[in-house]
Every structure is written in C-alpha cells, then in structure tokens.
Image: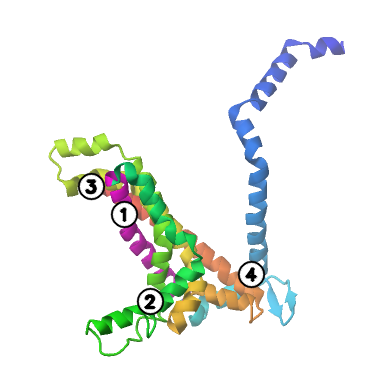
Amino acid sequence: MTVAAEGSPPLRMTRARRNALLQSEPVQGFALISPTFLYALILLVLPILVVIAHSFWTQHYLTIDRTFTLENYRVALAEPIYRDLLWRSLYISLTVSLFTVVLAYPIAYFISFHGGRHKSLWLFLITIPFWTSYLLRVMSWKVILGYNGVLNSGLMGLGIIDEPSTALLYNSSAVIITLTHAWAAAFAILPIFVSLEKVDRTLVEAATDLGDGPLRSFLRVTLPLSAPGVISAALIVMIPTVGDYVTPKLVGGKDGVMIANAIQAQFGKAANWPLGAALSVTTMLIVSLMAGATVLVIRTLQRMAR
C-alpha cells in the first residue's frame, strides 16, 4: 500500500514540481547569494537595531538605563545646537551633490561621446586621485587653502590681494570645496558615464535630423535618458557626505562643524551613547526622506523635459 502510494501520479507530480522549483534559475541564484546576503544583512541590520535600541535609553555616567524614553529625540530635534548642525550638514551635502554632478557631467559626456578608442585611458586617469589616501587628499586642500597656502600665494603674486586671506579655510566653503573634489571622480563621473554609454546614439541622430539643435537635442534626448546616472551620482555623493566628520574636522573649523562631529563627540568624549544614537537615527531618517525627495524631483523634471 505504501509503495503504491509513493508511486501514485499525484505524488510523482508533487516531486516533479518540487525538483523543478529547486532547479529553477531564481532558486539556484538565491541559494548562491544567500550566504553572502545573510552575512551582509547581519552586518547591516544588527548594528542599526542596536543603535535604534540605544536611542530610547538614557545614560547615567557609566551605566545605561534601559527604561524607554523619547528624551534623546527631544534633545536632538529641539536643542538649537543640534538642529543648526543638522541643517548645516544637509545644506553642505546638497550643495556638494549639486556641484559634483554639475562638474562631473561634462567630463562623463566628453568621455562617452568624444572619447573614441581612448575611453579606457580617460577612465584610468580619472581614478588616479584615488591611488592616494582620502586623508591625504583632504590635507592637500588644507595646504592649498591655508593662510600661507598655494591659493593665497598665487593671488598675492598676481596682485589681486595685498595680504593672505583668512576666509579660504576653516568654514563651510572649505568643506564644500574639499568634499566636491573628493567625491567627484569615481563616485559621480563613473555612474553618469555608464548611463551615457547606454544612450542610443540613433535617437540623438534622429533628433538632429528632425531639426533639433545640439542644445535642444541634449535637453530632450540625452539628458532625460541619462537621468538614472545623474540620480545615482547625486545619491551616492549626498548620503555619505552628510555623515562625513573627517573633512569638517580638518578644514571646517568651528564654522564648518557638521552633525557627524557631534555624533562622534557623543560616542567619544561625552560618553552619551543614547544621545549619539538618537542623533544618528534622526539624521538617517532625514537623509532617507531627502534621498526619496531628490529622486521624485529629478523624475518630475525628467517627465517635464519630455
């Protein structure tokens, strides 16, 4: 009876379906990436959960009170110092993203449309700055913008200024300049270049044949089709720069301090992990909302351009 049941048509069909499912491409693909996926999930989700949990607790000297409270979020959102640092960080991040995309797009466009057989060489040259440490690149801008730095010396040599200017360093502008240079190359040029490479050249030629000039053809064809690369570049630059604390610490001074410096201080010298966690979660949520809003705005502009 058991042998007959095992050999029955419904059971054979069930086994066949199960085997087909296990041998299907999606299941095999998931089985291939699942160990790495779980590893990355643990490394990403668990620390975030720990930070979120800490944000609802309070710290009393060296001990943590695990009683649920929203006081840390009240401080993070209501205290003027943290609110001002957060808005300054968002302003710097958005400005850096804008400048980076504006500077990166022409370079990526030139390489994609006019690079010819030397595209690989151009891309190779773009990555050269990344052969050096990020810290060294930040320090180089400190030398360039310093009181006796390259820029001040050049301006004095040209007779434009009589004495070195102190307005070039230790402010928000110095942070914006440094971050724009640090993130422009691979993080903005390459995503835009990849997007431009996917633009069908026959569409550009068709627009020209139908009477569009170079500018109109660019605005109606090339730019909308390369919008995914622009969005990717903007987000790739915007999200990490909000949390950058090395650059503001080295070239920002007291006028260029960002929210990440306050978070680092809370986890460091202040030893107030719950408040630092609340600042981190607040910043993360606001940046997520900004990223979503940026995508919506660019998509809206893309539709309007059509």
Q: CA distance from mark 3 to mark 2?
A: 36 Å
Residues at discs 2 and 4 in contact (Cβ within 8 Å) = no
Left or right: 239 in relation to 204: right
The residue that label 3 is drawn on is 218
- Point 36% across, 86% down: residue: 166
3 or 2: tag closer to the N-terminus:
2
Which label's residue is closer to the chain start, 2 or 1?
1
* Residue annotated with mark 2: 144
Q: Which residues are magenta?
A: 85-114
Quadrant occupied by the N terminus: top right
Q: Secondary structure at mark 1?
A: helix
Counting residues from the start of the chain, the first of labels 4 and 3 encountered is: 4
Mark 1 vs mark 3: give the one in front.
1
Q: Residues within 10 Å of mark 4 (few under 14, many from 20)?
A: many
Q: CA distance from mark 2 to mark 4?
A: 40 Å
Query: Which amino acid is tagged 3?
Result: Phe
